[in-house]
Amino acid sequence: MALQIVFRTDASRDIGTGHVMRCLSLARALARDNVDVLFICRTHDGHLCDLIEEQGFMVYRLPTPTYHFTPGVNPSHAAWLGATWQDDADQTCSIIKGLSVKPAWLVVDHYALDSRWESLLRPLVGHVFVIDDLADRAHDCDLLLDQNLFADLRTRYIGKVPENCHLLLGPEYALLQPTYAEFHDHIFPRSGPIQRIFIFFGGVDYDNLTGRALAAFLNLNRHDIDVDVVIPHNNPDVSEIWDLVARCTNVHLYGNLPTLAPLMASADLAIGAAGTTTWERLCLGLPTLVVTLAENQRELAANLHREKLVWWIGHKDSVDSELIEKALNQIINTPSVFDWSSHCLRTCDGLGVSRVECSLIYPP
């Protein structure tokens, strides 16, 4: 009988799409090795249940959120769940109890869930695997992944996980599509002048940082530089962006794409957020001007800035087109970003999915 692994994760206007997308990267690898994979997701506004099903995976849909949270509820992202943790646990338990086999693993990638939820689910599955970035709450799990690069990475989960929990820490475990590893092996550090720029602010860009970045570039009047801009279908400012670049032959707009790797590989510089796309850019050696969109991105962006892996311009509420323009102008007039690009390439090789998969199929 095939090994069965269940993913509990969500996407929404508040959560974004990164959690689901990285889980899909791992799920596809598992499916190729004949693992039976299914997802449990709540139908938030902006959910990706249809996309998951298009990838060939069964999705059990939890009810649309109706619960309203009061300030001070723990964990800090509890409102993102759309239910109390007890109700979510009960609903998830009901689904798992109805499965024909006991899942070998329950993969939990959700900032709103913690050890209380995990402890209730633990008896129904073989093992619990948590994917986290925040280290801001306790977990009851056998395996934990934090693919980020923090100064305290080796100590930040002390006292937050069981003593026998195995930790997968750092960018070597980043959950990227296989194509990134393929590009990584054949790409060279960027050298020479900036000739192509890549702009992408994630699956949810409700502050229109895409428009601000484009306006900043257009103010430079650099017709010798091409710009590739990815605008997901749910971007509320898509019409405004199209109008902005209607007569610009050097600006190329794209909708939803199966992978961003080819555009990243052909770019010399990127402008984007500090979400899960961070590791894709680093894997392809792409220097990036970063604007943080969420509070939980600040610490990571600051650390990557200190490590000279990105240039963190600032947070969304303090960054306007003029600030982006100033940073762009400085980088464009830099003779070369070779050292910066080389540093990025050395940080992430794109093989994280394979390493994580081995830990699931052959538990430590």
Image (spheres, rainbow, N blue to C red):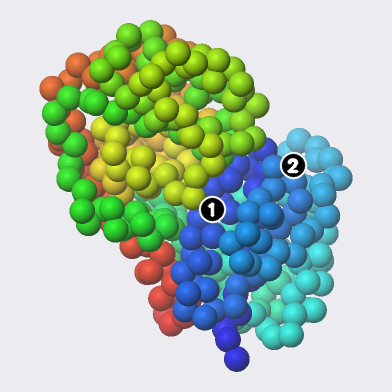
Q: Tell which of 340 and 37 is nearer to you.
A: 37
Q: Is residue 353 above or below residue 349?
A: below
Residue 41: x %, y % from top left: 71, 58
Q: Is residue 270 visible?
A: yes
Question: Is the residue marked by circle 1 packed among few (<14), some (14-19), or many (20+) residues within 10 Å?
Answer: many
Taking depth in this image into account, of 39 and 229 the one nearest to the observer is: 229
Spatial CA distance of label 1 from label 2 is: 17 Å
| Local secondary structure at mark 2 | loop
- The residue sitting at 39% across, 30% down in the picture is 228
Identify the residue position indicated by label 1 in the image: 21
For residue 189, which numbered disc appears in the image?
Answer: none
Please provide percent x and percent y for residue 266. 29, 39
Q: Earlier in the sequence, mark 1 or mark 2?
A: 1
Q: Which residue position holds label 2?
A: 45
Amino acid type, residue under disc 1 in the picture? Met
Question: Within the image, what quadrant is residue 268 found in?
Answer: top left
Residue drawn at point x = 69 percent, y = 42 percent: 46
Residue drawn 82% across the image and 49% down it: 64
Q: In this view, does 146 lie to the left or right of 250?
A: right
In the image as oriented, which residue stretches furthest toward the right? 66
Percent x, y of residue 358: 41, 76
Quadrant containing the C terminus in the rendered view:
bottom left
Horizontal placement of 1 versus 209: left or right? right
Which of the 4 image quadrants contains residue 15? top right
